[in-house]
Image (tube, rainbow, N blue to C red):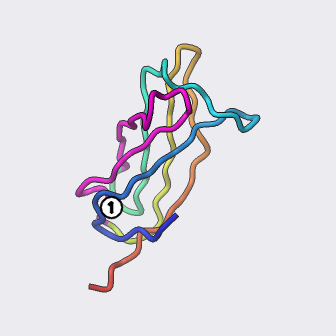
Amino acid sequence: MADIFKNDVGTTFRIMIKDETGAAINLSPASSKKLYIRRPIGTPLIKDLQFVGDGSDGVVQYIIVAGDLIYVGTYTMQTKITLPEGEWYTTAMSFAVRAPIA
């Protein structure tokens, strides 16, 4: 992952959702695709994920907007996918938001 800086806009988080065998899950029938972002300070963010293609490849993305990355520190993100068979959370992952030098 490339460096991410405070107040960045346009950074894309692209995530492939896989099953326990490592195979991509067909997300096309998903009724909900959420990204939860826990910031180092303040309230967590809940964002809607979008398909990159038609969802059959298991790939979703979110593009950072103004106000998402307002703190320097460690953020944690996790997706929640709702399919007709049930709801699942992915493994959480952390990323660092750095202070720009300017």
- The residue that label 1 is drawn on is 69
Decide which of 4, 74 is in the foreground and name it: 4
Within 10 Å of disc 1 (Cα), the crowding (few <14, some 14-19, many 20+) is: many
Looking at this view, name the residue that lies furthest to the left.
Answer: 66
Decide which of 22, 93 is in the foreground and name it: 22
Residue 70 occupies which quadrant of the picture? bottom left
Q: Is residue 100 left or right of residue 27?
A: left
Q: In the rendered image, which quarter contains the C terminus?
A: bottom left
Residue drawn at x 36%, y 41% is 46
Q: Is residue 67 left or right of residue 98?
A: left
- Give coordinates of residue 16: x percent, y percent: 56, 41
- Give coordinates of residue 90: x percent, y percent: 59, 39
Looking at this view, name the residue that lies furthest to the top.
Answer: 84
Q: Is residue 98 left or right of residue 7?
A: right
Residue drawn at x 24%, y 57% is 67
**Badge 1 element:** loop
| Residue 12 is one of the magenta-drawn residues | no
Q: Give the residues drawn in magenta, as a range.
A: 44-70
Q: Is residue 68 above or below residue 3?
A: above
What amino acid does circle 1 point to?
Leu
Looking at this view, name the residue that lies furthest to the bottom.
Answer: 101
Residue drawn at x 49%, y 18% is 29
Label tally: 1
Decide which of 86, 51 is in the foreground and name it: 51
| Residue 67 is one of the magenta-drawn residues | yes
- Give coordinates of residue 100: x percent, y percent: 33, 79
Q: Is residue 65 above or below residue 71?
A: above
Residue drawn at x 51%, y 38% is 59
Looking at this view, name the residue that lies furthest to the front.
Answer: 53
- Give coordinates of residue 87: x percent, y percent: 55, 24
